[in-house]
Image: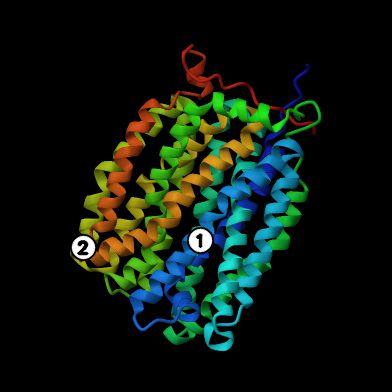
Amino acid sequence: MTKEPAPSPARMGRYIAAVTLGNALEFYDFLTYSFFAIQIGRCFFPSTSGYGSLMASLATFGAGFATRPLGAIAIGHYADRVGRRPAMLLSFMLIGVSIIGMALIPPYQSIGFMAPVLFVSARLLQGFSLGGEIGSNTAFLVEAAMEEMRGFIVSFQGASQMASALTGSAVGAVLSVLLSPDALTSYGWRIAFTLGGLVVPIGWWLRRSLPETLTAHTRTAEPIASRARLARSHWRVMVLGLVILGMGTIGAYVQMYIVTFAQHVMHLSAHAGFLASCANSMAAIPALLLGGWLSDRFGRRPVNVVGNALLLVLVVPLFAVAVDSGSAATFVVSMSVLGFVSNLTFGVVCAALGEGLPRTIRASAFGTVYSIAMAFFGGSSEFVVTWLIHISASPMAPAWYVAGATAVAQVALMFLPESAPVRVRRSPTAVNAKAPFRMRN
């Protein structure tokens, strides 16, 4: 079979922009909830105590993760059988419906118990759509990228998530300055959600222009049973990926908790919390791209092992400095350093897992592993951290929780096979990273 020509750098740049910008819009919609957990709790889950209202809100935040594996299986299967582009368009449409719905649902004071029921339903739909998104766009990037740049290009997926977190926290920072605390609770958070809904047409237009990497001669008609056997034959990569992503997402979503932590634990202003979140996300973006670039030159495994070890060493001291100072400025600086060191490996892990999975199950298998990890560990992280702080009366509880998870990930990363082409050519025992599919221009 003749290999199709690689896309030009300019065209490849447009493909990356379409996938990652669409991904950023989806994650903005999903993560904005985290930044306004306190305000949403007061609006939809009134309680006699602030702690009770916050816990109900965080439980709903976690509910969005429960449907992510279902979306990963359903939409991921669609991506593997029909195509990456239609799957990405479907997931984008669903998340647009959910975010607009969440922005428009009346508060508890207006419609009573139906308010939280509708809000939770919209959150479940949001999780379902995002579960299908991650496998489809990762598969596309792995297949479209030139093999010598695959780690760097796949890292744009993680960078787009951080860009969305940065945008969400920046919107929150602006709203916290312009609006009073009561206004922020009443309608300020709805403005942030509505902004996400307004950009949905842009993402739809971008994705409609994408080519399809799963063309007729690469599409499979294998029955589900055969595909399941193929997935089982790659159990090692999938299990290691589940552990690594699960432990890594604890750190990621504890950092999404920065805004709530600043207000609820350190008694800083919402504005200080949003600034710390902005700094954290700004530092994460170059770290993700740097990690991907390094992995293309030195291999996935060295970057993963060294980067994760750096986080393990620094996470507790960084939190200790921030908590002991009680200063907003120190908190912002500490969280920015944490954002850098904790994101050196995320894009590299995604590239390694994508390379280690066959094309015919790549979207569904990667999306399912990713979404299960997020559901069990990401969705519960903020709830667990709030509970740990409450029962221990220690503001250092988040740091120790992340440190424990990072230690477990370190062990799993030691066993993840090397898949970078630069190292595979020299090591017959590493995962065979085959050349990517080339699209017709």
The residue lying at 52 percent from left, 55 percent from top is 66
| Image spot of residue 342 (x, y percent) | 37, 46
**In the figure, is residue 126 to the left or right of 216?**
left
**Within-10-Å neighbours for mark 2: few <14, some 14–19, many 20+:** few
Which of the pair 76/190 is nearer the observer? 76
Q: Image quarter for residue 29? A: bottom right
Q: Residue furthest left?
A: 324
Q: Image quarter for residue 270? A: bottom left
Q: Secondary structure at mark 1?
A: helix
Which of the pair 319/276 is nearer the observer? 319
| Image spot of residue 219 (x, y percent) | 76, 30
**Within-10-Å neighbours for mark 1: few <14, some 14–19, many 20+:** many
The residue lying at 31 percent from left, 43 percent from top is 311
Residue 345 in sight:
no
**In the figure, is residue 175 to the left or right of 198?**
left
The residue lying at 61 percent from left, 42 percent from top is 135
Residue 267 in sight:
yes
Q: Secondary structure at mark 2?
A: helix
Q: In the image, which disc is placed on residue 63?
A: 1
Q: Image quarter for residue 28? A: bottom right
Q: Quadrant of the C terminus?
A: top right
Q: Is residue 134 above or below residue 213?
A: below
Q: Is residue 427 above or below residue 280?
A: above
Label located before the other in sequence (1 or 2)? 1
Amino acid at dot 1? Ala
| Image spot of residue 291 (x, y percent) | 44, 37
| Image spot of residue 171 (x, y percent) | 51, 70
Q: Residue furthest front?
A: 225
Q: How many marks?
A: 2
Q: How is the image coloured?
A: rainbow
**Disc 2 target residue:** 392
The residue lying at 57 percent from left, 54 percent from top is 67
